[in-house]
Amino acid sequence: MDFKIVHIDETDSTNRWLKDYPLPLSAGEDVVVVADYQTAGKGCGSNSWESERGKNLTFSMLIHPEGIPANEQFRITEVVSAALCETLEPYIKKKVQIKWPNDVYVGDRKICGILIENRLQGSVIKDSIIGIGLNVNQRVFLSDAPNPVSLYQLTGQETDLEVLLSQFLAAFGRVAASQTIARDYRARLYRKGMPALYEDQTGRFRATLTDVLSDGRLVLLDETSQRRTYAFKEVQFIVYSL
């Protein structure tokens, strides 16, 4: 995939910036906007993203998927998450995993967050704006966000941000063209096959993550052998602060 790459110094949110993209686009042109600093970087829901100026990769992609029905939009989450894992794995000795639906974890610590906003045209996806916040060279985190970690903290070395971005975009293209996207995503799932604590509207319970359905719903098997299925935001992983 060929991307038009735009570097900017500062914005409130790269996702918002792409929605209001000020320059004309060729039909179907894919764009990446990279910001040195986001004043109001967003995670899912009301979550914010802490990022020190010039230390991390904070960027958004505008892509135009071809022929993906609206009810199969979870495929985009699978591609982005798996591509980020593939990019980071050569740098890190520990496992890089996907905490459903699309956070990237190393052990019990979050190294990357993703926010995907799909725009529809009829019954198919017209385009997608994919916001990514990847902790790279930040050494200290000051917010109360639970369990952040950076590539520097894991490796003790600084990483060239432009090289890392280039590696991710190449991985994104490879994964998007793969016939094994769904399998690769599920093979990297954080806590898959492991009993752990979760919480839903009825309270906390122990269960084992067994699968993610094609529509993105999470499947847990609780201690009474009951199969529980959850859409996004219907269940919380209990991860204790380190």
Image: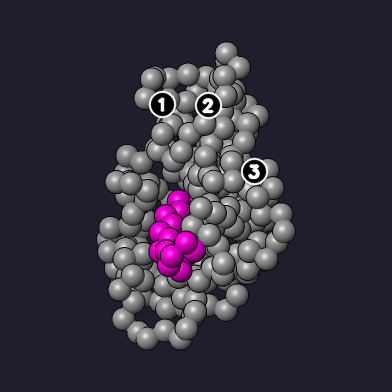
At 57% from the left and 24% from the top, the residue drawn is 227
- First of labels 2, 3 by sequence position: 3
Identity, as a three-letter code, of the amino acid under mark 2: Arg
Residue 94 horizontal side relative to residue 108, left or right: right
Q: Nearer the viewer, mark 1 or mark 2?
A: 2
Q: Which residue is mark 2?
A: 228
Q: Which mark is residue 112?
A: none
In this rendering, position of residue 126 left or right of residue 227? left
Assign a secondary structure to mark 3. Answer: helix
Q: Which residues make up the magenta segment?
A: 111-127
Amino acid tagged 1 = Asp
Quadrant for residue 95, please give it: top right
Examine the image and state in which quarter residue 121 appears: bottom left
Q: Are marks 1 and 2 in contact (CB under 8 Å)?
A: yes
The image position of residue 223, as x and y in percent, is: 57, 15
Under circle 1, the secondary element is strand
Compute the Cα span from label 1 to label 2.
Answer: 10 Å
Write down the residue under mark 3. 186
Q: List the residue tagged with mark 1.
A: 200
